[in-house]
Image (spheres, rainbow, N blue to C red):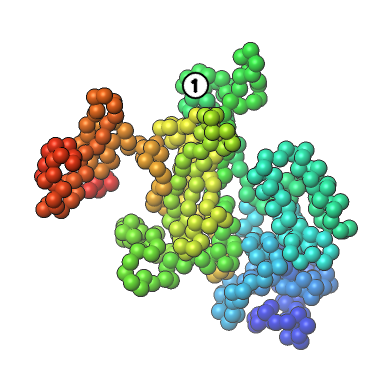
Amino acid sequence: MDKLWMHSDRRSKAYELGVESFLNFSIENLLTTAHIRCPCVKCVNLKLFGVGIIRDHLYFNGVDQSYKNWTFHREPWEATTNASRNVEEDDDHSRHSFVSEEIEMDDNDFGDFRSDPYEFANVIGDGDQPLYPGCRKYTKLLALVKLYNLKAKHGMSDVCFTELLILQGDLLLEGNTIPASMYTAKKTLCALGLSYEKMHACPNDCILYRKEYEDSTNCPTCGISRWKEGKYSILKEGVPAKVVWYFPPIPRFKRMFQSHETAKSLTWHAARKSIDGQMSHPADSPSWKLLDDKWPEFGNEPRNLRLALSSDGFNPHSSLSRRYSCWPVILVTYNLPPWLCMKQKFIMLTLLISGPKQPGNDIDVYLEPLINDLKSLWDEIRGVYDAHNGEYFTLRAALMWTINDFPAYGNLSSCVVKGYKACPICGDDTLSHRFKNGHKICYIGHRKWLPINHPYRRQRAAFNGKPEYGTPPEPLTGE
């Protein structure tokens, strides 16, 4: 069936004939005129209406142009595949909708909304709804997201945020769509499905209270209580002593592919060509090529993700005299172009480990849920929808690098980073010397990497009083 009408002007004769042909096609296949999914840009096949209402929606709202395969209206898959080849894709998607451009849903994409798909349809409507009549700069959802970011940035309480929403509603024009309470705002944002898990942890970093320890009140390793101590060492039952926030990455990777532009950018590395032979992107690195050679079935799919993990501690309090170390764990997606992969919107927070002390070598306890998800991503995640190509595919991902400073490198990789054998390259052959008076260890074997005839190798007084005739060690294989 010809679908060029979907890209025509809504006032044209071609669009009018196309709407009527679509409605006739739906009636013939679904054998009903009362319960048909509406493919307009606001309903996006989430609501059922009669033929008359759908006709009005298609004229008033326009048809969802990304709905190339009419699977909701029982068009055979072979027909949709052939028809979609004749339809030119419009790369300049409309930006008037904050959500409809970012999320394109199908029956298999409902995820958290499968129990209540109309709740998500309301979010899509909020992305189209202006903040107040005549407002072109902000939609209801965009304004709410920006206000919520201010709440998080400046630490507003829920009561303060509710009063701010009420004041904003009074200041704006009549008919504005600002929610009147924190509860209503949170309910709208939670419908996006970007949820998190709040897990209790042992204050001594022994375990997470999950799976078999979910109902425990004391740590099975050290015996310390799960609950926080209050005044006079009285336990505050129900108040955890330490909390970890986990933000699952798999739903967010699925959301990335449901955005037309982002899905296109995620395969940028496969289409590019290195002109000067220099490494301008991680795709030019030996590690990337080694992964493609060792697992060709992984490398042959350009949509499979290459990830890096980064972690470090920071003090979130304004007073630096207070000792407190909070550790975020971040994932970076290197499939994206260099000008996008380090943008804030694509840097993915997965874990937030609260203080007051750093986890140290016990960080692996907190990484357990993330590692489980990364293993699932390596095996495969089926039924991921690619909005750019208009098809489902099986997603895989590989963690290729870590980004951290030297002390955190020791925590994440279990390498020795202090003491006499602190060099991860030299290992047991590390040359080190401890000062008798300063009680510090210095490392003095750097000259072995210089060319064999370099003058520094023969100098004694400027270094440790000895010449250097050694050769650098063989690089480790990783095995």
For image coordinates 47% across by 32% down, the residue present is: 358
Q: Nearer the viewer, residue 226 or 434?
A: 434
Coordinates of residue 111 in the picture (x, y in percent): 63, 52
Coordinates of residue 230 in the picture (x, y in percent): 64, 18
Coordinates of residue 253 in the picture (x, y in percent): 54, 55
Q: Is residue 317 above or below residue 117?
A: above
For image coordinates 61% across by 22% down, the residue present is: 228
Q: Nearer the viewer, residue 367 or 411?
A: 411
At label 1, the amino acid type is Pro
Q: Is residue 59 above or below residue 46?
A: below
Q: Secondary structure at mark 1?
A: loop
Query: Which residue is situated farthest in the bottom direction here?
Result: 13
Relative placement, left or right, of 384 versus 57 is left
Q: Could you tell me which quadrant the C terminus lies in? A: top left
For image coordinates 22% across by 41% down, the residue present is: 426
For image coordinates 77% across by 71% down, the residue present is: 61
Q: Which residue is mark 1?
A: 220
Q: Is residue 143 above or below residue 213?
A: below
Q: Is residue 104 above or below residue 116?
A: below
Q: Quadrant of residue 155?
A: top right
Coordinates of residue 314 in the picture (x, y in percent): 51, 38
Q: Quadrant of residue 432?
A: top left
